Amino acid sequence: MHTHQIRGAVARASRFPVRSPLATAVLLAAIGQSAQAADNDQQNPQATALSAVTVTATRREASLQEVPVAVSVVQGEQLERDNRNSVASIVQQVPTLNYRAGASNKDTSLFIRGVGTISTSPGVEPTVATVVDGVVFGRPGQSTLDLLDLERIEVLRGPQGTLFGKNASAGVLNVVSKAIPEQTQGYVDYSHFGGGDENRLRFGLGGRLNEQLKGSLSTLWGDYDGNVENLANGYDVNGYERKGLRGKLEFEPSDELRLTLIGDYMKGEDTLPSGVVTQASTAFRNQLGAVRPSAHNRDISSDFKTHVEDENQGFSAQLDWQLGDYTLTSISAWRGWDNTQYQDGDRRALLPLTASHDKGTVDYDQYSQEFRLTSPKGQFNEYVLGAFYMHGTSRETYQRLSVNGGVANSGRADYSTTNESVALFGENTFNFTDDLRAIFGLRWTHDDLEYDHRRVSTSPTSVTGIQPSTASQGSVDEDGWSGRTGLQYDFNDNLTGYVTYSRGYKGPAYNVFFNMQPRDTGALKPETSDAYEIGLKSTALNNRLVANLALFHTDYDDYQANFFDTVANQVVTRLVNAGKVKTQGVELDASLQVTSQLKLSAAAAYTKARVDHFNCPAGAAASCDIDGGRLPFTPDWKTYLRADYVIPLDNGLDIELASDYSWQDSVQFSLDQNPDTVQGAYGIWNASVALADYNEGWRVALLGKNLGDKSYAQMLSSGGDYIYRSVPRDDGRYFGVQLRKDF
C-alpha cells in the first residue's frame, strides 16, 4: 500500500458516520511512520496479514471465514486490555448484541438481533444461549460472568438450535477459556481505575506437569466502590466485590485419548441500587429528600441496603476420543448457582410510615450430558451427530415487607421449577464440488417442565404489593423441532457466500413469581422462529483486509415476553405469549491491517425489530395497541470503530496506541412503548497508551474511558409515578492504569 493509498484509506475512515475523533488522533500521530512502513511492507506482504481467527461455531474448529454462520469474535486479550470485565461490557464492541440490565444479575439477559428473554421467572428459558467451554447455562442470570482468562468470545447471530440447543433461538454467546500452555508460564496483573475507586488483581500459572498431564490455575480479585451515592447514609453503591478462580487439567494417556477437567468458582457481592430516579411526580419528588431527579442523576435515598450476594460454580469433564479419523466427544457437567438479592421496592427512606423491602433467594442446580460424533473433513458428507440431556432444578424464596401508613404486612412465597430436556441432533455438510456445498441439520427436543408455588400472607386480603395466600402446581411436556438448511458457494479463494433457513425453538414456560395468582397457572406455548439469512465473507489485499456481510429476516410466533399488569395496586410485569414479532436487518464486520503497525476495525448493524401483532393479557395496566412498536433493548443502528497502532523503539520497547468509538441511536426499554423509557442516541469514546517490553515480559498502560463524558442509561423503567434508570460503570469520564508482568 502506497502513501497516497494510506491517506485515502484514512480519509474514507474519517467519513464513517460517527460523531467522534475516534481514531483521528491515533492516525494523524502515526501517518508519517505509517506511510514509510507501508512502502517497506511491500517487500514482505506476510508481515501485514491479519491473523487467522478460529471458531467452534459448527462444533468443530474452523476458520471464521469458512463457516456459513454470522459470527462476531472478541479476543480475550483485547477485553483484558480494554478493562471489559463482564458480558455487559462487550455489547459496545458487538453491534448486534444488547444487554438487559436489572435490579440484580438474576434479572439480566442478553439480546441478539432484537430478541432476548424479558422475564425473571425461573420457568422461562434463555433466548440467547450462553455456552462456556462446551457447557450450556440453563438460566439467563448465570450469564452475568466476570470474565477470567478468556481465549475469545464468539457471538453467533441468529437461531443456532441445531447444534447448541433449544435456548439458542436468537443466538449463542460461546465463551472459550485459554488453553493450557505447553511450557510453564504465568502472569500477574493489577489495574486501578477512578470513577469509584476500582481495583482488580489477577494471577495465572500453567504448564506441563509430565508427559501425559498439564494444568493451569487462574485467580481473580476485584472491588469497586461504585458511582452512585445513597444520600440517606452517605454510602457509595453500584459497586462490587468479587473473587474467583478457574482450574484446568488435561490428561492425555495416548495420542487417541484426551480428558479435560475444568472447575470454576466465582463469589461476588454487587451493591446495585434498586433504581436511580430520573423523573417523578411532584408528590414522589417531595419524598426523595435531597435527591434531585434528572437524566444524569446518580443519587438515591434508601433506608434498606440493596445488594446482591452471588455464587456461581461448576465442574465439567470433556473426553475426546479419536476413533480413526472420527472424534467422539463426551461433556459431563454440573453447575450450581446461589443468588440472594435485597431490594428497596419503594425507592425511598420513609420508615416507619412507608416501605417495600424484598429479599429473594435462588438455589439452582443443573446437570448435563452431551455426546457428539464428528466425522473427518474432506469427505463428501461431513457431519456432527449428537445426543443431549439436561436436568435443572430451581428453588426460590421471596419475602416482602409492605408498610403503608405505619401498618406492616408481610408475605412469603416458596416456589420451585424442574426442567428435563432430551435432544437428538445432527448436521451434515454435503460437498458437491470443491466450491459448492449444502448444509442440512435437524434437532428434536423433548421438554418436561413442572412448577410448585406456595405463598402465605399476614393479610387475608390484598395489600400494596402482596396478594393473599395461595398454592398451585403444574406440569407440561412438549416436543419441538429446530434445524437449519442452506447452500454455500466459494466464488473464489477470497470470497464465499451462503444462504440459509433456520428454524428456532424455545421450550414451554411458566410465569412463576412472588405474587403469582390462579390466573397465572397456565403454561405458555413454546416460542418458535423462522430465520432467513444471506451472507458474504471475503478477504483481500493478501489477507490484510477481511470483510463480512449478513442480511437477515426472522419471524417469531408465540413470542414470550412480559407486559404490564396491576397486582394489589402495584404495577408488575406479566409473562404472556405476546404474539408475533419480526426482526430484520444487515450486519457488517471489517478489519484492515493497514501496515504491520496500524490496524483498523469496524462493525455496524441495522436491526429493525418490531411487533407484528400483540396479544393483550387480561387486566393489562397499559394500552396494548403496540403493533408496529419497537422491541425493547435494541436500537435500530449500532456502530463500532477501532484503531490500534504500535510504534517499535530502537531500545526494544513498544509504544501501543489504541482508540475506539461506539455509537447507537435511540433505544426503547419498555414493550408498552412508554415515551419516558427511551434512551436517546449517544456515543462512547475510549483511548489508551501503553509501554511494553515483551522480551522482558512487562506492560504498563494508561486508559481513558468515556472521554466525551457522556451520561446514559443501561435501562429505563416506570414505577408508576416515577421513572428510574440503571447506571452503567462508564456513566462519565474516568481514567485508569494497568500493570502486567509475565514470567
Image (tube, rainbow, N blue to C red):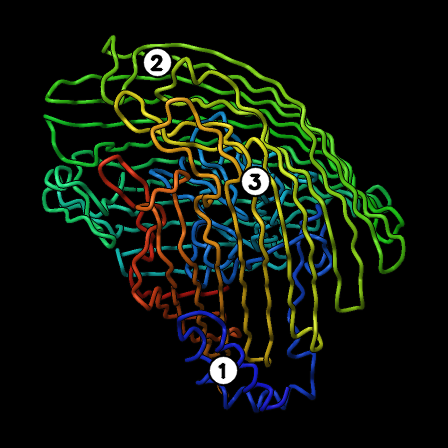
- Within 10 angstroms of label 1, few (less than 14), some, or many (20 or more) residues? some
The residue type indicated by label 2 comes to Arg
Q: Are marks 1 and 3 in contact (CB under 8 Å)?
A: no
Q: Quadrant of residue 261?
A: top right
**Residue 566 versus residue 420: which sits nearer the camera?**
566
- Which residue matches tag 2? 455
Q: Is residue 217 above or below residue 513?
A: below
Q: At 43% from the left edge and 57% from the top edge, which residue is drawn?
A: 84
Residue 540 vs 585, above or below: the answer is below
Residue 240 seen by the camera: no
Residue contact at pointers 2 and 3, CB within 8 angstroms: no
Q: Amino acid at mark 1?
A: Ile
Confirm or deny contact between disc 1 and disc 2 (CB under 8 A).
Answer: no
Disc count in the image?
Answer: 3
Please indicate whether residue 287 sits to the left or right of residue 639 in the image. left
Outermost residue toward the top in this view: 460
User: What amino acid does circle 3 point to?
Assistant: Ala
Select label 1 or label 2 by which is in front: 2
**Pointer 1 residue:** 647
Q: Which residue is mark 3?
A: 129
Numbered disc 1: secondary structure: strand
**Distance from the alpha carbon under mark 2 to that under mark 3:** 31 Å
Q: Residue at x 42, y 50 (%)?
A: 220
Q: Is residue 561 above or below residue 499?
A: above
Secondary structure beneath dot 2 equals strand
Q: Nearer the viewer, residue 346 or 57?
A: 346
Q: CA distance from mark 1 to mark 2?
A: 65 Å
